[in-house]
Image (tube, grey):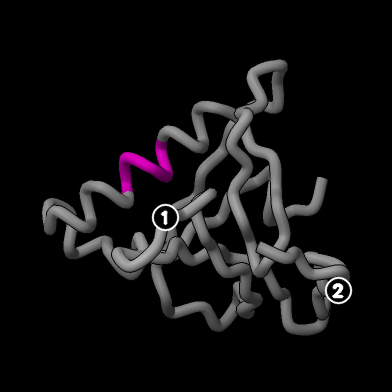
Amino acid sequence: MALRSESLYQPLDPSKSEIRLLKLHPRQADRHEESLQLTMFTTSSKKCEQKYFALLYVWGEDISNNPITINGHSVPVTENLLDFLLHYRDLTEANKVQEFADMPFWVDAICMHQ
């Protein structure tokens, strides 16, 4: 997979109180995925009618050997975040958490561009 060369992080508009959210893509049945695929998008926190999960985790030495892919960019994450995303995708695909299947994520260490 060729990764994009432009920056993953586009500037946020402070006048709109924008935040970044992540959307987890379903597994692609027709091909072997090298990493989890996500899309990052911006929305206004003031006008955000969409619910989202807020995930907070600590940066540490336990960075996974399997990065995730966000908007075509390879992004290293901790093992605990990778484990959560894999487990969450499995649950949504098994229709065990359908009421949350389309809910995006706000992940502090990724969405805040630390």
Q: Which mark is residue 11?
A: 2
Viewer-side residue, 36 vs 18: 36
Q: Is residue 59 above or below residue 41?
A: above
Q: Which mark is residue 40?
A: none
Three-letter code, disc 1 = His
In terms of image quadrants, where is residue 100?
bottom left
Q: Point out residue 106 in the picture as x, y percentages from the top left corner.
A: 56, 56
Q: Point out residue 33 in the picture as x, y percentages from the top left corner.
A: 46, 54
Q: For the residue labelled by badge 2, is the local secondary structure a helix, a strand or a loop?
A: loop
Quadrant occupied by the N terminus = bottom right
From the viewer's perspective, tell me whether residue 75 is left or right of residue 53.
Answer: right
Three-letter code, disc 2 = Pro
Please provide the residue range marked out in magenta. 84-88
Magenta residue check for 87: yes
Q: Which residue is denoted by mark 1 in the rendering?
A: 32
Q: Point out residue 48 in the picture as x, y percentages from the top left corner.
A: 51, 78
Quadrant occupied by the C terminus = top right
**Residue at x-position 65% and y-position 69%:** 71
Q: Point out residue 10 in the picture as x, y percentages from the top left corner.
A: 82, 73
Q: Residues within 10 Å of mark 2 (few under 14, many from 20)?
A: few
Magenta part, dominant SS: helix
**Residue at x-position 63% and y-position 29%:** 65
Q: Is residue 39 above or below residue 109?
A: below
Q: Residue furthest front?
A: 31
Magenta residue check for 69: no
Mark with earlier residue (2, 1)? 2
Viewer-side residue, 100 vs 35: 35
- The CA span between labels 2 and 1 is 33 Å
Q: For the residue labelled by badge 1, is the local secondary structure a helix, a strand or a loop?
A: loop
From the viewer's perspective, tell me whether residue 3 is left or right of residue 106.
Answer: right
Q: Is residue 27 above or below residue 16?
A: above
**Residue at x-position 81% and y-position 66%:** 9
